[in-house]
Image: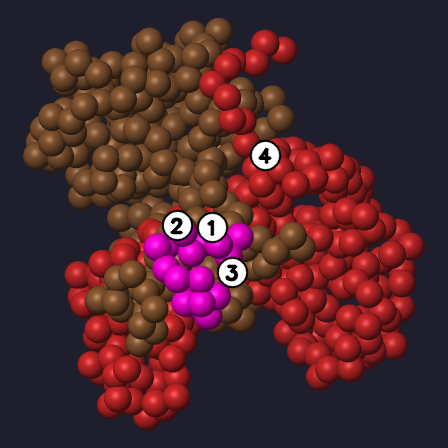
Chain colours: A red, B brown
Amino acid sequence: MSGNNSQPGRTVASRMLAILDAFDFEHPRLSLSELARRADLSLPTTHRLVGELTSWRGLEREDDGKYRVGLHLLELGLLSGVHTRLRDVAMPFMQELYEATRENVHLAVRDGDKALYVEKLTGHRSVPIISRTGGRLPLHTTGVGKALLAWASPAVIDSHLGRQLSRPTRYSIREPGRLRRDLRRTRRRGFATTREEMTLGSCSVASPVLVDDEPVAAVGVVVRSSSLELDRLAPPVLAAARGIGARLAEAGDDPYPGYVRDHTPRPNR
Amino acid sequence: MSGNNSQPGRTVASRMLAILDAFDFEHPRLSLSELARRADLSLPTTHRLVGELTSWRGLEREDDGKYRVGLHLLELGLLSGVHTRLRDVAMPFMQELYEATRENVHLAVRDGDKALYVEKLTGHRSVPIISRTGGRLPLHTTGVGKALLAWASPAVIDSHLGRQLSRPTRYSIREPGRLRRDLRRTRRRGFATTREEMTLGSCSVASPVLVDDEPVAAVGVVVRSSSLELDRLAPPVLAAARGIGARLAEAGDDPYPGYVRDHTPRPNR
């Protein structure tokens, strides 16, 4: 094993994963020395592992010598179940929701205490917002997050409400009692709303995608706060969430339920 | 190093990458022994590395004991430049193209001798097709592929035409002379077309996204072959390709040109 390292107990595998984990939203491009520092590895070890990752095309070296995540990691990631099973099934329903609203349409899953945005449809006329595919936002300040939390198990809700909750705007709800009432109302109505709780100027409506009563994802729409008729948006959001849930339940174990496999043209409509 | 392996010269890092490479479109879910066989590793080595990858959440173990690519690899992949720089910029233009056509809209990049599909928008009324995000199809039988090839360097074109070209349908063009004429016509018109060359029943129109005259991507639409007015589809496809190219040229080195960073609401339109 490469001995000139500060933590000789680390495995080579974990060193390689530490290099990949050096990249995040705030650090999408890193030099070799930045990589070594962020992964806590010696420069020679970093150099060798980055070389292997680059020839594998998991990393790409740009013209200025900085590295970023490469095409092969994107390709691998797109094989994940969240993409092939959930996102591909959800896409036509999200597209209908976009057509009905012309606003940002989100698909998110719960990843620990955050909502991870798996897909986002957006048009030139949609309100500019900070979500991005692959990004995470808090559960208690986003529509999709509240929808995921409201249908989570009591243990998950309790553990979430027990934390110190962030407050991105003055409208964010972080008092456990108020949040609990909001989640109860969300379950009763079948959809969550936020009013400038994540971003000033933006409101949202979201509903969970339920499979066997489990919230496997949430779908939502973000609009500018001047369009205050959030209740009007609920029916198409609910229809999309239910459509995705029904299709997923139907798909069972199929790894690619959203994908057409044979080359035979289907009869025209 | 773990000695009980058939190829003791392989590095631990390359063994880990071999495990990831065992997954592909045809093999999205693999048992431990299938992983060992496909990665050409001993079962103990596979077990140990899969354990590290699973606790890192790059792999997920499903209820039946099979493994598949996990959420963390999707999250990492979405940090790639192709996603954050290209796909996020392209999305609103693709959305407009979808609204104008209601058909499958593709964004692809050239990866060696294949078109890699980076994004696909599809509705319930779109013709069912075999493309999928993260998938690859041949350059010479797809609209986006021909658009990428037509604007490639003469060396790339020559090397491509020198290969044995596949023929997924009886309409696929694989004679070098005919293909060369098709590519010349594509460059002259500014867009590529295919007529049942990849899939019987489907036709396509695509145009390259040019930045400094380089075809960095291609955008295209796939329709059923009963809608034969491909030329009618060319103007919105060209507009989308040009719009994306102009936005990319403008964005320069910004790693997230499609993303809104601050929380300040923009004034209403």
Q: Main secondary structure of the magenta part?
A: helix
Quarter of the picture holding the C terminus of chain A: top right
Position of residue B117 in the picture relative to residue A263 (left or right): left
Q: Are marks 2 and 1 in contact (CB under 8 Å)?
A: yes
Position of residue A31 in the picture relative to residue B30 (left or right): left
Residue type highlighted by circle 2: Arg
Where residue A1 sits in the image (x, y, percent)?
Answer: 28, 82
Residue A259 visible in image: yes
Question: Are both tags, 4 and 2, on one chain?
Answer: no
Which region of the structure is painted magenta?
B31-49
Which-is-in-front pick, marks 4 and 3?
Answer: 3
Seen in the picture, residue A189 relative to A185 is either above or below; the reply is above
Residue type highlighted by circle 3: Leu
Instruction: Give the labeled residue for mark 2.
Output: B38
Q: Residue at x 22, y 83 (%)?
A: A43
Question: Are both tags, 2 and 3, on one chain?
Answer: yes
Residue in the foreground of this view, choosing between A183 and A55 = A55
Seen in the picture, residue B143 relative to B133 is either above or below; the reply is above
B35 is within the stretch colored magenta: yes
Residue in the foreground of this view, choosing between B257 and B139 = B139
Which chain is indicated by disc 3?
A: B
A122 is within the stretch colored magenta: no
The label shown at residue B59 is 3
Instruction: Give the labeled residue for mark 1.
Output: B34
Position of residue A178 in the picture relative to residue B252 (left or right): right
Which chain is indicated by disc 1?
A: B
Q: Earlier in the sequence, mark 2 or mark 3?
A: 2
Q: CA distance from mark 1 to mark 3?
A: 15 Å
Instruction: Give the labeled residue for mark 4.
Output: A258
Which-is-in-front pick, marks 4 and 2?
Answer: 2
* Label 4 SS: loop
